[in-house]
Amino acid sequence: MVSHPPKALEQFDIAGRSAIVTGAASGIGLAYAETMAEAGARVTLTDVDGAAAEREAARLRAEGYDARAAQLDVSDRARTTQVFDEHEAAYGGLDIAFANAGVGIGPGFWDPNGHRAPDGQVDSYNPEYWDRIIAINLTGAYNTMRDAVRLMKKGGKGGSIIATSSNAAVICEAIVPLPYMPAKAGVSHMVKHLAFELAEYHIRVNAILPGPFVTNIADGSLKDPVVRAAWDKSTPMGRIAEPYQIKPLALYLASDASSYVTGAQMLIDGGMALGKFH
């Protein structure tokens, strides 16, 4: 028993820790990186668009935060290992990792107006899209978490790994491309398995399952008023989310505030997984 347990807000303190975020140049990944920096952590922003990652890291540095950037396609295992090693060299270890990078390519079997999308049917969906989504969303998450575990074990202090899954891991979405859902379901199950495996090393592994957020995924389609209206209508709360709304949950899972939480699947979807409104 702790004789003088920390106060609630003290448990959210991550000042001085180091974090790495994949897919951090925009959207939810950028919100994660901003959260880490704003809370006093030293953060590496990685993204397949290296110039965009560096631009955001430079903005954070200009605001007085400790941030660096690296170009990274998480489906490239060798490059992932290199980027994590560079993070360790810069910051002396790794405390927090967000396996966030993801893509959504191609249509679902319905379009936003509720009509069949010819290119989204299972027998006509482009198999190259399948391969790319699985390579980034599932294998890329594995590559990221694998190297995060390697560094955290080496440091001997444990750590927190947070993977971005999706509410599409637990429900089916007609306007979401087919491979996105099994990829995210795989991420969610991998999180539970790794949490089970790594608990004795004091490495916590949890998943955030967002519903629709206004990001650049799927070529930024949620910024289209027609597409956004369709998602707004299908959400019990009647609206989709902005990336800033995920920040408190990210800080909770990254910090000691969630020190007894591992293997969790944290839905943040405006109630969509409860059922759809039409």
Image: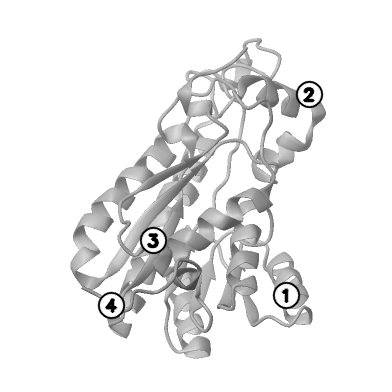
Identify the amino acid type marked 3: Ser
Identify the amino acid type marked 2: Val
Alpha carbon separation for disc pair 1 and 4: 29 Å
Q: Residue at x 65, y 72 (%)?
A: 38
Alpha carbon separation for disc pair 3 and 1: 26 Å
Q: Nearer the viewer, mark 1 or mark 4?
A: 1
Looking at the picture, how far across and down is residue 15, in whole percent? Answer: 53, 80
Q: Nearer the viewer, mark 3 or mark 1?
A: 3
Q: Nearer the viewer, mark 3 or mark 2?
A: 3
Callout 1 environment at 10 Å: few (<14), some (14 to 19), or many (20+)?
some
Q: Residue at x 50, y 87 (%)?
A: 91
Residue of label 3: 258
Alpha carbon separation for disc pair 3 and 4: 19 Å
Callout 4 environment at 10 Å: few (<14), some (14 to 19), or many (20+)?
some
Q: Nearer the viewer, mark 1 or mark 2?
A: 1
Q: Which mark is residue 226?
A: 2
> Dividing the picture into quarters, in which one does residue 147 lie?
bottom left
> Dividing the picture into quarters, in which one does residue 25 lie?
bottom right
Looking at the picture, how far across and down is residue 5, in whole percent? Answer: 34, 74
Residue of label 1: 60
Horizontal side, residue 233 vs residue 95: left or right: right
Q: Which mark is residue 153?
A: 4
The quarter of the image holding the N terminus is: bottom left
Alpha carbon separation for disc pair 3 and 2: 38 Å
Q: Nearer the viewer, mark 3 or mark 4?
A: 3
Q: Secondary structure at mark 2?
A: helix
Figure check: 173 above or below 69: above
